[in-house]
Image (spheres, helix red, strand yellow):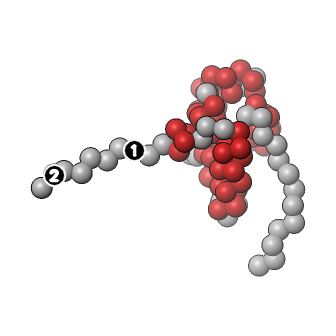
Amino acid sequence: MKKTITTRYDVAEHLRTPKEMAAYLDACIEESDGDASFIAKALGDIARAKGMSQVAKDSGLSRESLYKSLSGDRSPGFDTILKVIAALGLSLHAGLAAKK
């Protein structure tokens, strides 16, 4: 019997366009259930897809700081989130939440 070879899936390899990146972030926000570190991790995936060095340059943050902040192991400050979102060319929008 032939062995099945698997490789680790990296969503950053599949986020090619700004539209795909925005859709991914929207989906992650919807699925996050208020988990800020989950959203930070999603931003990290998008930043890696765009190029962490470029995002660091555009946001004015260090590359090392971005990796730590967007790892999903912690919840970064809102100022960091806003800088990263702007550097990615994305924006936040407010809408009405569905009643539970």
Residue 81 x, y percent position in the rendering? 75, 40
Foreground pick, 20 / 66: 20
Marks 2 and 1, how far apart at CA: 19 Å
The residue at which mark 1 appears reads as: 8
Amino acid on which disc 1 is placed: Arg
Residue drawn at 59 percent across, 34 percent down? 49
Question: Residue 55's spot in the image, x, y percent?
Answer: 69, 27
Write down the quadrant of residue 32 in the picture.
bottom right
Q: Is residue 58 above or below residue 15?
A: above
Could you say which quadrant of the image residue 29 lies in? bottom right
- Looking at the picture, tell me which residue is in the foreground, 57 or 9: 9
Q: Is residue 30 visible?
A: yes
Q: Residues within 10 Å of mark 1 (few under 14, many from 20)?
A: few
For residue 56, above or below residue 89: above
Residue 74 visible? The answer is no
Residue occupying the point 85% across, 51% down: 93
Residue at 87%, 56% in the rendered image: 94
Image quarter hosting the C terminus: bottom right
Image side of residue 70 versus residue 58, left or right: left
